């Protein structure tokens, strides 16, 4: 057996129904079942959650921070995507 | 993201490998810090910043888990079921704090096993406060009041430190620390309402923990050469001496309410400064304990290493169990 360290899992917690699961940290665990158990003990000791997701960290694909300009800057000049771009007559401007 | 897997340096065709020191990256980094922004795990950072953070976050993590030992010492001897449940919850929190912080350190490209190895071989430091013995039940109260109290003062500014994963871990920790301090004070209040002997136990514990507590803020500003760089990087927001003064000022009133005195004849209000003056700190003792000369250090590390080694078969069996399960699943597919 090569690997001695338990793999890393990312933990996402839904704090209450109606809200998204939100990333809150990570844990080491040998398998999915124990990852959930450990995540419960580490991240929800004070009723911080009603549901937990765990994902093995190396299954996550993330964007490259250096690609930030090409990925996100093109949205900068699309101001017509926002409702405030449109100035309507006063009587109907609450639309 | 809190992941080491995501922290692999990537190639950038324009500016060269991200792992390399590069004035253009440095300028972007400095600008981010100056604007009060956060650095995230995959962002470029100077190697010295990364190293400083690994050292600081892992020392902090080690302190949390070694800190479980002096208090764990009293779990089986708590005077009531209520106090036992409270102490168990508190010690469990400290374990949790260690885990949040190890996870934050791991985003900087070190493994959990490496960090623990550094602790267990004595290469890494942890807060020297945990090398003092917990002689009576009153020590448990005084640790909560003074030691967790000092830790809170130290930790609140870190909630805004420039490294995102560390700052987020600190926010979580600070939310939980207030309970630690209050349960300690509450425990002491109960003892002060008890017998003369109990009151003497409280005073004795205060006498032993006061100086070590104010040493927790570290050397005087003039003697901490790395502070300027850490402030520049947004890892340290308030100086050691300012935090210590804040702690002393806050604690004096709490001692009065409790009915104990601090073992410092020079501790008194200075109207001109608007702060309390206090006596000179015995730094020889501080460095002696920091550098690990003392039975406390030996005992703490021995307990840590024993726990780690005794648990080795469980960690290995759990991995092997998963390996077999995955192999069975693979075969069935
Ligand atoms: Fe803690
Ligand atoms: Fe604490």
Image: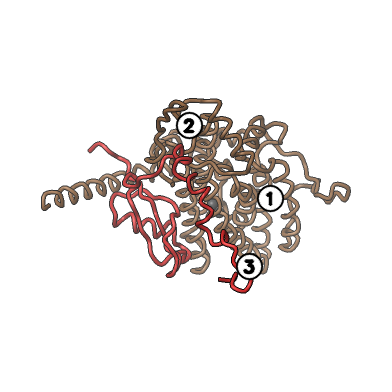
Chain colours: A red, B brown
The x and y percentages for residue B277 are 81, 46
Mark 3 to mark 2 CA distance (whole Å): 41 Å
**Label 3 close to label 2 by CB (< 8 Å):** no
Q: Are marks 1 and 2 on the same chain?
A: yes
The chain holding disc 3 is B
Sequence-wise first label, 3 or 2? 2
Q: Is residue B81 above or below residue B177?
A: below
- The residue depicted at 78 percent of the width and 45 percent of the height is B278
**Label 1 close to label 2 by CB (< 8 Å):** no
Sequence-wise first label, 1 or 2? 2
State which quadrant residue A70 falls in.
top left
Between label 3 and label 2, give the one nearer the viewer.
Answer: 2
The x and y percentages for residue A57 are 35, 46
The chain holding disc 2 is B
Residue occupied by mark 3: B190
Mark 3 to mark 1 CA distance (whole Å): 18 Å
């Amino acid at each position: 057996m090569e690997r001695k360290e338990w793999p890393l899992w990312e933990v996402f917690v839904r704090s209450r129904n109606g809200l998204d699961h939100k990333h809150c940290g990570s844990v080491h665990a040998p398998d999915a079942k124990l990852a959930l158990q450990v995540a419960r003990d580490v991240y929800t000791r004070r009723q911080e959650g009603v549901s937990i997701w765990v994902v093995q960290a190396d299954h996550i694909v993330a964007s490259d921070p250096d690609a930030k300009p090409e990925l996100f800057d093109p949205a900068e000049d699309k101001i017509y995507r926002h409702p405030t771009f449109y100035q309507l007559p006063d009587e109907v401007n609450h639309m | 993201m809190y992941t080491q897997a995501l922290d692999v340096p990537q190639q950038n065709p324009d500016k060269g490998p991200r792992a390399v020191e590069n004035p253009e990256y440095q300028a972007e980094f400095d600008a981010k810090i100056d604007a009060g922004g956060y650095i995230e795990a995959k962002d470029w950072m100077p190697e010295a910043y990364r190293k400083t953070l690994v050292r600081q976050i892992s020392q902090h993590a080690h302190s949390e888990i070694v800190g479980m030992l002096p208090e764990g010492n009293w779990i089986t001897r708590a005077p009531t079921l209520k106090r036992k449940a409270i102490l168990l919850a508190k010690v469990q929190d400290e374990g949790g704090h260690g885990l949040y912080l190890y996870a934050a350190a791991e985003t900087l490209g070190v493994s959990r096993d490496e960090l623990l190895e550094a602790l267990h071989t004595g290469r890494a430091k942890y807060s020297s406060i945990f090398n003092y013995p917990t002689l009576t039940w009153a020590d448990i109260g005084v640790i909560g009041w003074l030691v967790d109290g000092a830790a809170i003062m130290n930790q609140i500014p870190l909630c805004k430190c420039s490294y995102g994963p560390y700052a987020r871990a600190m926010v979580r920790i600070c939310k939980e620390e207030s309970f630690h301090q209050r349960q300690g004070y509450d425990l002491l209040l109960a003892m002060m309402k008890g017998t003369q002997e109990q009151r003497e136990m409280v005073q004795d514990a205060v006498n032993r923990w006061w100086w070590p507590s104010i040493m927790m803020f570290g050397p005087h500003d003039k003697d901490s050469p790395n502070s300027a760089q850490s402030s520049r990087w947004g890892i340290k927001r308030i100086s050691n001496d300012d935090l210590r003064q804040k702690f002393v000022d806050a604690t004096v009133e709490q001692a009065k309410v409790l009915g104990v005195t601090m073992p410092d004849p020079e501790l008194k209000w200075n109207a001109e400064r608007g702060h309390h003056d206090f006596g000179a700190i015995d730094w020889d003792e501080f460095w002696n304990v920091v550098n690990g000369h003392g039975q406390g250090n030996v005992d703490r590390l021995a307990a840590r290493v024993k726990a780690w080694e005794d648990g080795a078969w469980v960690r290995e069996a759990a991995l092997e169990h998963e390996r077999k399960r995955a192999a069975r699943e693979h075969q069935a597919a």
